[in-house]
Amino acid sequence: MFSQGQIIFGACFFIAFVIAITIAYRKDINIHKSFYKGNYKVLLAFLGFIGLLFIIKIFFKR
């Protein structure tokens, strides 16, 4: 399905991408701490809303 060259390129690209993302995140970690202090609250609210939708779906299905 894939040639050996394509697999090697994909693996090298993935490794380089992970390294680049890690370096970029480490540089911006102080900015993230100051600008995104309460983002876990938004995540919890979103997960709660999705859970509520599932509960409503189960309730009305029966």
Image (tube, helix red, strand yellow):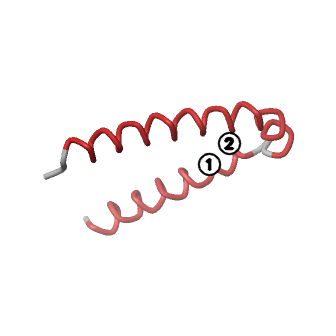
Question: What residue is disc 1 on?
Answer: 43
Task: Report, in whole angstroms, how far the alpha carbon at label 1 lies from the one at label 2.
Answer: 5 Å
Position above or below: 45 against 7: below
Q: Position of residue 47 (x, y in %)?
A: 53, 50
Q: Residue furthest front?
A: 5
Tell me whether the residue at label 1 lies in contact with that at label 2, contact meaning CB atoms closer than 8 angstroms.
yes
The residue sitting at 51% across, 41% down in the picture is 17
| x, y percent for residue 27 | 76, 34
Residue 25 sits in which quadrant?
top right
For the residue pair 33 and 55, the one nearer the viewer reads as: 33
Location of the C terminus (image quadrant): bottom left
Kind of residue indicated by mark 2 = Tyr
- On screen, residue 21 versus residue 9, left or right, reads right
Work out whether residue 2 or residue 18 is closer to the camera in this orientation and state it: 2
| Label 2 residue SS | helix
Instruction: Say which residue label 2 marks.
Output: 40
Q: Which mark is residue 14?
A: none
Q: Residue at x 68, y 51 (%)?
A: 42
Where residue 58 sits: x, y (%)?
A: 32, 60
Asked if 3 appears above or below 8 in the picture, the reply is: below
Residue at horizontal 58%, vertical 55%?
46
Q: Is residue 5 left or right of residue 45?
A: left
Which residue occupies the foreground of this view, 33 or 46?
33
Q: Residue furthest bottom?
A: 60
Dot 1 alpha-carbon crowd within 10 angstroms: few under 14, some 14 to 19, many 20 or more:
few
Residue for point 81% across, 36% down: 33
Considering the numbered disc 1 on the image, is that residue within a helix, a strand or a loop?
helix
Dot 2: within a 10 Å radius of its alpha carbon, few (fewer than 14), some, or many (20 or more) residues?
few
Give percent across and percent down for residue 39.
72, 46
